[in-house]
Image (spheres, coloured by chain):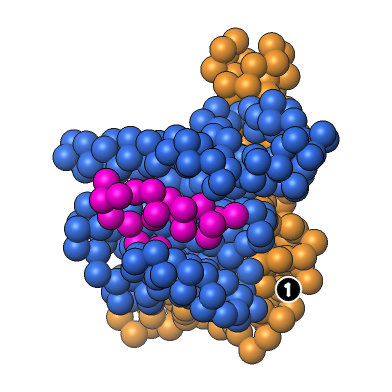
Amino acid sequence: MCDTCGCNVTSGNQHLVQPGGALSHTSDGSVAIEVLTNLLSENDKIAAHNRQHFDAQGVLVMNLMSSPGSGKTALLEVMAQQLKGRLKIAVIEGDLETENDAQRIRQQGVQAIQIVTGTACHLDAHMVHTELHKMDLKDIDVVFIENVGNLVCPASFDLGHHINVALLSVTEGDDKPEKYPVMFRAADQVVISKTDLLPYLEDFSPDKAILHIRELANDAPVLQVSVKNAESVEAWIDWVISEVAMQKQRLLDGVDIKTKTQSDGVLLHEHG
Amino acid sequence: MHELSVCLALIDQVEKVAQSHHATSVDLVVLQIGPLSGVEASLLKHAFPLAVAGTLAEKSVLEIELLSIKVHCMSCGKDSDAVINRLVCGHCGDYKTQLISGDELLLKRVGLVGIEEAENQGVAHV
């Protein structure tokens, strides 16, 4: 937000902050001003700017979120190998340190930018915005933003992407959606990864994991993928291709989509 | 984990509201937080003194209103209370529900000091 244009004043709260508005005086002489804006509205504004940029280029953007080590980079690597010209992808990598993941992606002939967050446990819209203009999005169909491995914080920040994908590897346990509801409630697609290990993990039930996701009122499709099984990776690629087609149609129809990370509380909810 | 960065964004907003009203300081900050916002109120309270240091809100009091989770069932049409990891309908058990409340992360109200003096001065100049 800026100091001059008053863009923190929305149509919903304008009447409260204008002179003569409903300013209630407190006993000690200070004046209480009703604000009712989302605390992350500055991030959301940059995110909307990022999304406009992606939409202008006709690019679909997916935010990959999961615990560290669930196989996000491996999925992108194998995907790049199997794509065979069907889609052109680019990747933004987020990690606390190292350029390792971007290097792995580049080795597959895919454009990759690394964001090193230092101590920050999540990517935010500002970080993505800084890198955005370094990317050549011409002819790109999908940008994957591989978020910092963390099942908590990334879910709260809109980056300007269109779709949230949450990965859950079978070694993590099938109750992760129950333990990290904010993340799994926000997912538009869940990938249960490393399913080649299922024979060794009697405790992990994909059905139970799906049940926990449904209990979060989330009917997102759930794919079971092993990067060692080309057929399962094909199912993931098919889903991505169908989402790209849907996004191109939405852009033609002038329909905006945004992710479930943002709280539209101000507009949706009424609080006294 | 990200409560300090949320808190810094909060103080940024509070200062802008204060500046737009020509307030000399802020004595009260009221937030509304729902469990599904992903922000922990107790951690936010710990981060608040760090974030306000050297700002107009340095001596302000932070009040957090915790909101409960409520869902509306798309199947039976009823509203019910829910818990963070079980957002199904409390009446019929269906998972096709919409969240009515519980994901808020809102700056609700700020208490501004010194507004009246500034406004009076404005009137005197006219």
The three-letter amino acid code for the residue at tag 1 is Ala
Q: Does residue A198 show up?
A: yes
Task: Tell me where residue A2 sits by quadrant.
Answer: bottom left
- Quadrant of the image containing the C terminus of chain B: bottom left
Which stretch appears magenta?
A71-92
| Mark 1 lies on residue | B47
* Badge 1: chain ID: B
- Quadrant of the image containing the N terminus of chain B: bottom right
Identify by letter the chain in blue: A
Q: Residues within 10 Å of mark 1 (few under 14, many from 20)?
A: some
Identify by letter the chain in orange: B
Image point (30%, 49%), residue name: A84
Residue A4 pos. (x, y %): 33, 76
Task: Tell me where residue B96 sits by quadrant.
Answer: top right
Residue B22 versus residue A189 in the image, above or below: below
Residue A182 versus residue A69 in the image, above or below: above
Camera-nearest residue between B68 and B17: B68
Residue furthest to the right in view is A203
